[in-house]
Image (cartoon, grey):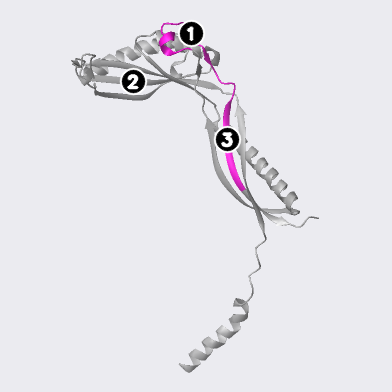
Amino acid sequence: MRLAVAAALAALTLASPALAQPVPPRAPTISVMGTGEAELKPDFARVNVTVATQAETVAQASSANNTATERVLARIQGLGVKREDIRTANFQVFQTPQQVGPDGKEVKTPKFSAHHRLQITTRDLDGVGRLAGEILASGDMTFQSVTFGLDRQEEGGDKAREAAVRDARRQAEVYANAAGVGLGRLIEIRDGSAQPFEPQADMRMSMAMAKGAESVPIVPPATIRYTANVQLVWEMAQRP
């Protein structure tokens, strides 16, 4: 037992110089948050419409909706939109909500409603207004919204991140020069978010006024803007 204790004390004594070595101080740092933006021309527009039907049973409402949707598809394709550029975004059948007239009495309506939301993709940005006008003139579908997008969504985010890094370095250099120090090693990068700003179409006429119009004055955005932020940390260094 005494031999074991002595061996342990000897080992601790030999190790203590290594344990007692001082930890080198961490170099002072400069930490900044950079922000960046990128603007790219949109490649396509997405038009969202809803085909709505009502009937006394679920089966009848669904069947009526299918018939109405076929008419809608034929009409949209007649405008030059390819069938593969039209897809179902959502389909649902539900009990028709109770409706009350101006006199406070319940208005009798069919028991079930079917809503089929379609998403139409078009690359003819200048023709979006004509497409919207055709939709508004149709009794089979309701115009919902128009959004614009890029084929390569990541491109906008990447360019915004690059701009954010440049902004962070610029700020760091300003701080370093003002403090009389230099920038050393880049030791940390913390990625922030990169978000697109998805503009809605600029519609200069209300939908009620545009009902039946051949074309709605929709102005596509010139660009889609992306924003990003990043935090970078440099070690301070002495100026040469």
Element under label 1? loop
Please state which of the two labelled residues, at mark 1 or mark 2, is closer to the viewer: 1
Q: In the displayed orientation, state which residue is furthest to the bottom.
A: 2
Give the residue type that dot 1 points to: Ser
Q: In the displayed orientation, state which residue is furthest to the right.
A: 240
Residue contact at pointers 3 and 2, CB within 8 angstroms: no
Number of residues whose C-alpha sits closer than 10 Å to that of mark 2, classed few (under 14), some (14–19) or many (20 or more): many
Q: Which residue is mark 2?
A: 116
Q: Which residue is mark 1?
A: 215
- Tell me residue 210's x, y (percent): 44, 9
Tell which circle, 3 or 1, labels the residue nearer the N-terminal end. Answer: 1
Name the foreground residue: 176 vs 62: 176
Tell which circle, 3 or 2, labels the residue nearer the N-terminal end. Answer: 2
Spatial CA distance of label 3 from label 2 is 34 Å
Q: Is residue 212 magenta?
A: yes
Q: Is residue 222 above or below residue 207?
A: below
Name the foreground residue: 33 vs 9: 33
Spatial CA distance of label 3 from label 1 is 33 Å
Q: Which residue is mark 3?
A: 227
Name the foreground residue: 232 vs 159: 232
- Tell me residue 85's x, y (percent): 46, 19
Tell which circle, 1 or 2, labels the residue nearer the N-terminal end. Answer: 2
Lateral position of residue 222 relative to residue 54, left or right: right
Chain part drawn in magenta? 205-231
Q: Is residue 107 above or below residue 42?
A: above
Figure quadrant of residue 140: top left
Element under label 2? strand
Give the residue type that dot 3 points to: Thr
Lateral position of residue 14 relative to residue 88, left or right: right
Element under label 3? strand
